[in-house]
Image: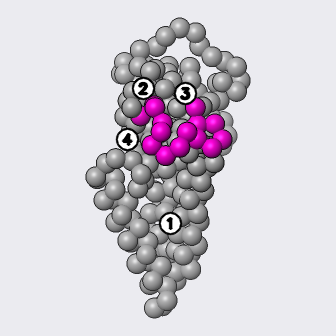
C-alpha cells in the first residue's frame, strides 16, 4: 500500500511539474523556497521568473519577529507584497502581529475546527454528522492551505484565508458554512 501511494504521488508530481509551463515554473519556485527543502539545505541557485511573491511573503513574515510591527504598520502590503489582501494575507498578519499573532490565528482556526467537529459528532443523524464534518474540514483545510502557501510549505494555489482574505465569494461560502454548522449543532438538541 505504501509503495502504491509513493508511486501515485511521484507520478502526480511529475504530471504537475512537467505539464503546462506556468505549472512547471510554480513547482520550480516551490522547490526553491520550500520550507522542507530549506530544512534539508537543498536550495536551488539562480532566479526563477515569478518568485518575487513568495520571497516577499517570507520577508514579511520574518520582519514580524515575535510581537510584530504593530497593527497597520507593516510595509510589505504597501510596497512589496503583491496580492497582500488575498493570497498572502497571513504573511501580513505575521508581519504586523508577529509570531504570536500568527499563531493565534492558527489556533482560532483549529479551535473552530475542533468545536465544529465535536458539535457535529454529537448529532444522531448520520447525514448531518458527516455534513458537519465536511463543512468544518473545508474551512480548516482552506486555512491550512493558505497558511502553508504563505510560509512556503505548499506551492502557490490562490486559496483564500477564510473570513480574513479579501474575496466576496469566499466570505459568502464560508458564512453559509458557519450558518449550516450552527444549524447542525442546534438539531442535536431536537433529536
* Quarter of the figure with residue 19: top left
Q: Check the picture and name the quadrant holding the N terminus.
A: top right
Upstream in sequence: badge 3 or badge 2: 3
Q: Relative to 96, is 184 above or below?
A: below
Under circle 4, the secondary element is: loop
Q: Which residue corresponds to mark 2? A: 80
- Proximity of marks 1 and 2: CB atoms separated by less than 8 Å: no
Q: Residue 24: within the magenta?
A: no
Q: Residue at x 57, y 70 (%)?
A: 115
- Which class describes the residues within 10 Å of circle 2: few (<14), some (14-19), or many (20+)? some
Give the alpha-carbon distance from disc 3 to disc 2, as whole Å: 10 Å
Q: Is residue 78 above or below residue 184?
A: above
Residue at image position (34%, 52%) is 170
**Magenta stretch, residue numbers:** 63-77
From the top left corner, tell me how far across and down residue 113 is, in percent. 55, 62
Q: What residue do we see at 41% from left, 67% from top? A: 178
**Nearest-to-viewer mark from 3 and 1:** 3
Name which of mark 1 and mark 2 comes first in the sequence. Answer: 2
Label 1 vs label 2, nearer the camera: 2
- If you read the primary sequence from the N terminus, does the residue marked by circle 4 or circle 1 appear first? 4
- Identify which residue, 122 or 176, lies in the foreground: 176
Q: CA distance from mark 3 to mark 1?
A: 36 Å
Q: Secondary structure at mark 1?
A: helix
| Mark number, residue 59 | 3
The percent position of residue 57, horizontal first and vertical second, equals 50, 31
The secondary structure type at the circle numbered 2 is: helix
Q: Is residue 3 left or right of residue 112?
A: right
Q: Which residue is the site of mark 4?
A: 85
Q: Give the Cα distance between marks 1 and 2.
A: 38 Å
Are circles 3 and 2 on residues that touch, CB within 8 Å? yes
Residue identifier under label 1: 133
Residue 170 appears in the picture as rendered:
yes
Amino acid at each position: 500500500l505504501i509503495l502504491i501511494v509513493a508511486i501515485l504521488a511521484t507520478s502526480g508530481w511529475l504530471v504537475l511539474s512537467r505539464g503546462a509551463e506556468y505549472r512547471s515554473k510554480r513547482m520550480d519556485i516551490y522547490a526553491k523556497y520550500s520550507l522542507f527543502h530549506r530544512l534539508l539545505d537543498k536550495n536551488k541557485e539562480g532566479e526563477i521568473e515569478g518568485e518575487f511573491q513568495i520571497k516577499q511573503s517570507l520577508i514579511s513574515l520574518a520582519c514580524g519577529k515575535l510581537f510584530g510591527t504593530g497593527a497597520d504598520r507593516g510595509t510589505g502590503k504597501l510596497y512589496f507584497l503583491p496580492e497582500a489582501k488575498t493570497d498572502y494575507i497571513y504573511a501580513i498578519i505575521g508581519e504586523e502581529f508577529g509570531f504570536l499573532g500568527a499563531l493565534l490565528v492558527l489556533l482560532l482556526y483549529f479551535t473552530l475546527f475542533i468545536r465544529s467537529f465535536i458539535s457535529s459528532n454529537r448529532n444522531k443523524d448520520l447525514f448531518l454528522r458527516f455534513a458537519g464534518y465536511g463543512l468544518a474540514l473545508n474551512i480548516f483545510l482552506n486555512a491550512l492551505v493558505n497558511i502553508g502557501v504563505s510560509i512556503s510549505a505548499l506551492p502557490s494555489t490562490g486559496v483564500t484565508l477564510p473570513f480574513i482574505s479579501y474575496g466576496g465569494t469566499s466570505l459568502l461560502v464560508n458564512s453559509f458554512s458557519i450558518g449550516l454548522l450552527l444549524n447542525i449543532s442546534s438539531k442535536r438538541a431536537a433529536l
